[in-house]
Image (spheres, grey):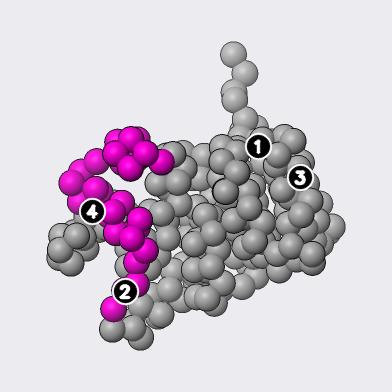
Amino acid sequence: MSEVKIRVVLVDDHAVIRGGLQQLLGGTSDIEVVGTAANGREALEVVRRIRPDVVLMDLQMPEVDGVVATRMIMSENLGVDVLVLTSFSDSERILAALDAGAVGYLLKDADPDDVLQGIRAVSRGESPLHPKAARALLGTRAGSTQVQLTSRETEVLGLVREGLANKQIARRLDISERTVKAHLTSAFARIGVSDRTQAALWAERNGL
């Protein structure tokens, strides 16, 4: 039997970058580029038509930017995960992308293998975060007296503390597993942890 490939749509307004990413991903046996787009509006049209597994999304683009495009894609419940790949590592953009529903955040100065591993991680249900992005979020957290979580993030963290898996959390809250992953990615970034065990300990210490 042939290996099931991870189907990816590339979204970036620079043709050279799209071409480079196509070449990088095309050199693997488990990832397939099934579509490209040059802005967020095109991205939504392509994703609606193709229904890929992962969208590799730039943020700074004309017409419709990556944050808005991510929010639109996630609002339509198309069964797609969005992984951001951008040049920006400021906490404001990172949080905006995660709040919009992105499940991971990588930077363009990452090693090519990190991009491949990031796509694979997303397909496994994980949430890759570039170290620079993580440090930016931790810096924001350190400068704040209180971590601001949404009500849904608080609910999800409380259920992680109870030991529930994503599928169980989704059933409990009547939302999709992808939505659970998006909330966890955002919550992990806000509280400065990288896995469920750390998140559960944080939730316990903070009375969730």
Instruction: Tell me residue 61's x, y (percent).
Output: 75, 66
Q: Amino acid at mark 1?
A: Pro
How far apart are labels 1 and 2 at the CA level? 34 Å
How far apart are labels 3 and 2 at the CA level? 36 Å
* Disc 4: CA contacts within 10 A as few (<14), some (14-19) or many (>=20): many
User: Which is nearer the N-term, disc 4 or disc 2?
Assistant: 2
Instruction: Tell me residue 131's x, y (percent).
Output: 47, 67
User: Which is nearer the N-term, disc 3 or disc 4?
Assistant: 3
**Residue 163 falls within the magenta-colored stretch:** yes
Which residue is at a point 59% across and 13% down the rendered structure image?
A: 1
How far apart are labels 3 and 4 at the CA level? 36 Å
Which residue is at a point 80% across and 56% down the rendered structure image?
A: 38
Q: Which residue corresponds to mark 2?
A: 147
How far apart are labels 1 and 4 at the CA level? 31 Å
Q: Amino acid at mark 4?
A: Gly
Label ID, residue 52:
1
Label ID, residue 158:
4
Say above or below: 8 vs 18: above
SS class of the residue under badge 3? helix
Q: Amino acid at mark 3?
A: Glu
Say above or below: 175 vs 41: above
Q: Nearer the viewer, mark 3 or mark 1?
A: 3
**Residue 32 falls within the magenta-colored stretch:** no
Q: Nearer the viewer, residue 127 or 156?
A: 156
Q: Which residue corresponds to mark 3?
A: 45
SS class of the residue under badge 1? loop
* Disc 3: CA contacts within 10 A as few (<14), some (14-19) or many (>=20): few
Q: Nearer the viewer, mark 1 or mark 2?
A: 2
